[in-house]
Amino acid sequence: MTDRGEEVAGDVRDADVAALAGALRKAVRGEVGFDVTARALVTMDASNYRRVPLGVVAPRDADDVAAALEVCRERGVPVVARGGGTSIAGQATGTGVVLDFTRHMTALVELDPGSRTAVVQPGLVLDRLQEAAAPHGLRFGPDPSTHSRCTLGGMIGNNSCGSHSVAWGTTADSVRELSVITARGRRLRLGQGWAGAPDGLRELAEGELARLRTGFPELPRRISGYALDALLPEKGADVARSFCGSEGTLGILTEAVVRLVDSPRARALAVLAYADESAAAEAAAGLLPLGPLTVEGMAADLVPAGAGLPGGGAWLFVETGGETAAEARARAEEIVRAADVVDSLVVTDPAAQRSLWRIREDAAGTATRMPDGSEAWPGWEDCAVPPARLGGYLREFRALLAAHGLRGTPYGHFGDGCIHVRVDFDLLTEAGVGRFRRFSEELAGLVVAHGGSLSGEHGDGQARAELLPRMYGAEMVGLFERAKAVWDPDDLLNPGMLVRPARLDENLRFSVLPRRPVDVAFAYPSDGGDFRAAVRRCVGVAKCRTTTVSGPAVMCPSFRATGEEEHSTRGRARLLHEMLAGDLVTDGWQSREVLGALDLCLSCKGCRSDCPAGVDMATYKAEFLYHHYAGRRRPAAHYSMGRLPEWLRWASRAHLAPLLNTLAATRPLAGLGKHLAGTAPERDIPRLAPRTFTTWWRKRKPTTPGASPTESAPTSTPGDLVVLWPDTFTEHLAPSVGQAAVRVLEAAGLRVALPPTLLPRKGAIGDGRTRSAAALLTARRARVCCGLTYVSTGQLDRARTVLRRTLDLMEPVLRAGAPVVVLEPSCAAALRTDLPELLPDDPRAARLSATVLTFAETLERHAPHWIPPAVDRPVAGQTHCHQHAVLGDGPDRRLRAAAGLTGELSGGCCGLAGDFGFEKGHFDVSRACAEDQLLPSVRQAPEDAVILADGFSCRTQLDQLADVRGRHLAEVLAEALDRADGGR
């Protein structure tokens, strides 16, 4: 086998790979994966680069690491250490064997508040350390924006920093000792005073003291190259510190002793507004003498509308700390007085501060799209210059962008002179890649001219290592190569990074994608109709890999249930990327690997809103299933639950509800039915309502004497007309929700109608009950349907047929411009998003999508002066995942507050998610998703709490797993109205 990492994957014979895999399985106790899925999941990190490994090993301990290194060394196979996979320069990818530390080596071994230290394994996620340290008033200083999923090993490998580095420095400043295994199997304990130094390192450093004292720029964010100056005697000959930032090229970290710092008891956030980012940058350095904890900068292009920031074109987020809230505020106000600002705001509420910080933390993802929707990429987004020179550097950087016809929006650590920016490089064409290289070379010169570092946080990797001679000169780079040879003489550890690097325009992950657009069913309007661009949205920031979520967040429930990368949004996107590439996943839409990864996707749509890059895996899953099963037999659940509206309409017309309910309650018959339908044997079959919602509607009495059943107010003062959508769940399974909605909407002064049920050539708005002789002779009976069940199972041709019929039925409604009230959040989301994306050429689709309102939105917009009845009780339950992701819940919050319903609903997904939780083989994951947030929130609720769940799936999950009755908000308000009427 060759020792060159770039050549390994193409040169190794299948027999050699099989022998390597077998030897590793014998040598280590952890998992060894040489299958397509295991390899596909780690071909990329968060960079522009892609390298296909031979296999993946998840070591259980240091002995496993040593054993894996021995096997690979004997065969000349390179080894790459990988943590959260969020590196932005390509250093977490490799062509040999990848060591995945996130499965087993994730322990917080010890935390000693007295010495303010912690002993950690490399796979420990930073937030887990912060959570353990917080009760002691301590924290780990560095905090990258990926703190919820980045690992301590990755932070040490990259010498990560984060927003608080002006106060607490880089990861290297927080490292005491490191336990390392070299490629040749030596176990070293690195520390100060040459502790743990490999043979020859001291002699190398002491022979180059003058170069080490003069060859490194002095600035707080110098991450590029090896930190050999940490070996100087005046700096304590700190071998551990010099190892930080070596990107896995010198040794494999197995344990670390890190320093903790005091965490301020109170914090305040001063938001300072400036005309543009250059003005903000010039002001940043002047604030440092005031001792802030952070000085972060952002421009307007990255801030969403309604973020609540003071008026300006760019902002500094300056955090202060104190023993009390008053002290923290006073320091923030001092900073405001010292700053020359356009406007300012001081935020002391912790929740409001978190909301603002989320904007900053999500920038790594949101910056991947320019304001016009075009793509932007990393590669040159963390250069650093002396803070005092940042303003001038930014102006020249902007000029360089313009000279190359490029765009980017800078943001980042202004107090440290470190700027992040995603640039709209064209990395798909030869000409665009050429411009990427020319810009990179010129920008490197600009950074060096300002006394800066090519990397100020994310490391050199493949993105910048080629240009290190421009920063350090050939002789210093030669010294780096000699240091690498001391640690790793066989060049087995992450070859091609830092020294003897691959070219910055090689191994680009885009080069393997098809040159022509892929034929797809959805329109992908945000991606120019291009499925390749949709898949490229995942840049690897891995917010989907968070193991805990707070507030209303949803993404990614299946990953939190299994802990497997394959079941994260990023993992699925990686497999889709490899499917399009075709050299690892070779069978395209027929891929069993992609199908397996998508199988546990709940189609919750959480990633659509929670992913900073806007990945929409629910749509991608539907697309894949459509192609995968084209012309093939589908799973039984696709026929039973995917076509649920048809079966329920048939049962209703045949008056079979009582019989089917009896059969469902008979255990042997129910078991047989579930087996044939492909549903989980653990599930109970929901009971059909004895009378459908529309049957109740037709037979109800007018609410006003002399008025038709569609009128709800005296004819002298008619209210707005609204059309209530009889979704499948409300119609056949929970008609009480529809009845309650009618009660409330009419009490609010609105006139309620139902959609037409006939397809005449012309006509007024139907109310679901009117029949004329002419209509009966010329029209056919039909029902509106959002197509949700067909979409979620990938039956997209059928979904389009259903949706076109729905548009035909709704034409009178569209002509009248009446709003359409949809009670089931998943159906409303389908009409808002899936409808126009499946029928982009039908203008009626966009018109109907625009008329769709939720129950709360309807009351807020069309009955703004109506005062709901006072319920005055606490609430618990869950915001529907589709409502969170697509519809928004602001009107619901305001309606609950007006009714005296206090408290917050949990986030996450209930786990039933339409057909998902009912499908055979999904029950355990479905239950785990419910246990993530929904069920704990209900168990912890006060006894008198109202359990709110607007989705039928959510209510069913509560009923079947917790024996708790959840209710739609409409039901709660209708009951309150009835009580009020009874009292009067």
Image: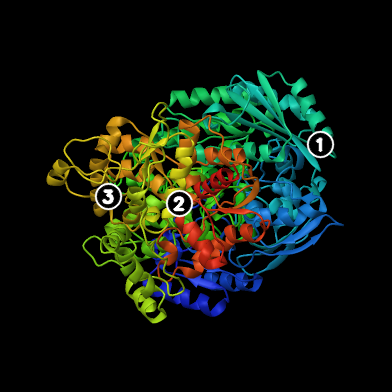
Within 10 Å of the Cα at label 1, are there few (<14), some (14-19), or many (20+) other Cα atoms? some
C-alpha span from label 2 to label 1: 46 Å
**Kind of residue indicated by mark 1:** Ala
The percent coordinates of residue 298 (x first, y second) are: 59, 30
The percent coordinates of residue 32 (x first, y second) are: 50, 72
C-alpha span from label 3 to label 1: 59 Å
Depth order, front residue of 225/836: 836
Does the image show residue 11? yes
Quadrant in which the N terminus is drawn = bottom left
Q: Earlier in the sequence, mark 2 or mark 3?
A: 2
Q: Earlier in the sequence, mark 2 or mark 1?
A: 1
Residue bearing mark 1: 325
Checking the image for residue 244, the label placed there is none
User: In the picture shown, does residue 668 fall above or below 567?
Assistant: below
User: In the picture shown, does residue 466 fall above or below 495?
Assistant: above
Extreme right residue here?
114
SS class, disc 2:
helix
User: In the picture shown, does residue 909 fall above or below 106?
Assistant: above
The percent coordinates of residue 241 (x first, y second) are: 73, 51
Depth order, front residue of 607/758: 758
Residue at 45% x, 51% y: name it: 737
Extreme left residue here?
777
SS class, disc 1:
helix
Tell me the mark number nearer the camera, choosing from 2 and 3: 2
SS class, disc 3:
loop
Residue at 54% x, 69% y: name it: 73
Within 10 Å of the Cα at label 2, are there few (<14), some (14-19), or many (20+) other Cα atoms? many
Checking the image for residue 783, the label placed there is 3
Residue bearing mark 2: 737
Depth order, front residue of 116/594: 594
Q: Earlier in the sequence, mark 3 or mark 1?
A: 1
